Amino acid sequence: MNEKDMIQEIQNLKKEKNAVILAHNYQIPEVQDIADIVGDSLKLSQEASKTDAEVIVFAGVHFMAESAKILSPDKRVLLPVYDAGCPMADMVDAKALRMFKDKYPDIPIVCYVNSSAEVKAESDICCTSSNALKIVKSIKADKVLFVPDQNLGSYIKEQVPEKEIILWEGYCITHHRVSGTEVEAAKKNHPDALILVHPECNEEVVKLADFVGSTAQIIDFAKRTEHESFIIGTEMGVLHQLRKDNPDKKFYLISPALTCYNMKKTSLEDIYNALKHDQYEINVEEEISKRALVSLERMLKIS
């Protein structure tokens, strides 16, 4: 089947099964274009919680599909590529968090949404990169454990000096490997460009940026500003939306290392097979789902 026919078949199957396709901004362009909704983790969490569709096809990674299932337990959630995972999410586990809670029962746990359902279930509230600052500020305690992203946590820590933020030793392998040297080289090659980076980047990179924000915030900033050229410090998939929204502006990726291979696993054929064969359905154990839902709903209320 050629690409045109496959796209038509996907549209037919969507109608037949009352399905919606959610795609993260880091997906390949063809998948973003076939999706009903494209966004960052916060937007996709919000959309998953209110969709009327019976089936959610989630073009993303495993923890995202899990979150969609937790927020919409009566819907079928399909992850087109079952082994599309997240190394950062694997850097924290529920057992370690339970040990922390046993030792420090009065310290609330803020859990980045890039984590497993089991970790969310052990946490007090979730956050995304879009709302992490607001979430941390909303907590009355003067100490907080932030898991699992030490870089996002460090960025928030700088802005909330009145709180002691304990950082977990986890990170996004894609954003973390970008260096300050690469940023400086990009700036030398494009001296008129503004540097826009994601807070999952390490502290050295964040300090060199003109703007720091989530995927959605970077897209919004580039659209609103009159500036015409930008150096982008987040996963390369975001370039597709940036260029669509701003055809007269120029965008340069800081480093080719900004490629998440898990996000790039999903193809149009995978979307088609997910709809055609109902693969791969994501389920979450009921007790874990109930507890994780509390953390996610607390986040969405503040968002």
Image: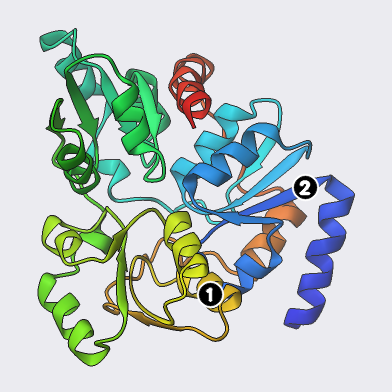
Q: Is 97 left, or right, of 234 in this rendering?
A: left
Picture coordinates of residue 18, whole percent (x, y): 83, 45
Label 2 crowd (10 A; few <14 / some 14-19 / many >=20): many
Q: Is residue 7 above or below residue 282?
A: below
Q: Name the residue at 51% across, 36% down.
A: 66
Viewer-nearest of discs 2 and 1: 1
Residue type for callout 1:
His
To which quarter of the image does residue 56 belong? top right
Mark 2, secondary structure of its residue: strand
The reply to whether residue 1 is in sight is no
Pointer 2: what residue?
Answer: 19
- Quadrant of image for the N terminus: bottom right
Residue type for callout 2:
Ala
Mark 1, secondary structure of its residue: helix
Q: Name the residue at 20% across, 46% down.
A: 155
Q: Name the residue at 44% across, 82% down.
A: 228
Marks 2 and 1, how far apart at CA: 24 Å
Of residues 283 and 168, the one nearer the viewer is 168
Label placed on residue 283: none
Q: Is 50 left, or right, of 110 in this rendering?
A: right
Q: Is residue 207 above or below residue 91?
A: below
Label 1 crowd (10 A; few <14 / some 14-19 / many >=20): some
Q: Is 265 left, or right, of 127 in this rendering?
A: right
Of residues 132 and 170, the one nearer the viewer is 132
Picture coordinates of residue 177, whole percent (x, y): 18, 65
Q: Name the residue at 78% across, 80% down.
A: 4
The reply to whether residue 61 is in sight is yes
Pointer 1: what residue?
Answer: 240
Q: Is residue 34 above or below residue 82?
A: below
Q: Is residue 8 above or below residue 1?
A: above
- Sooner in the amino-acid sequence: mark 2 or mark 1: 2
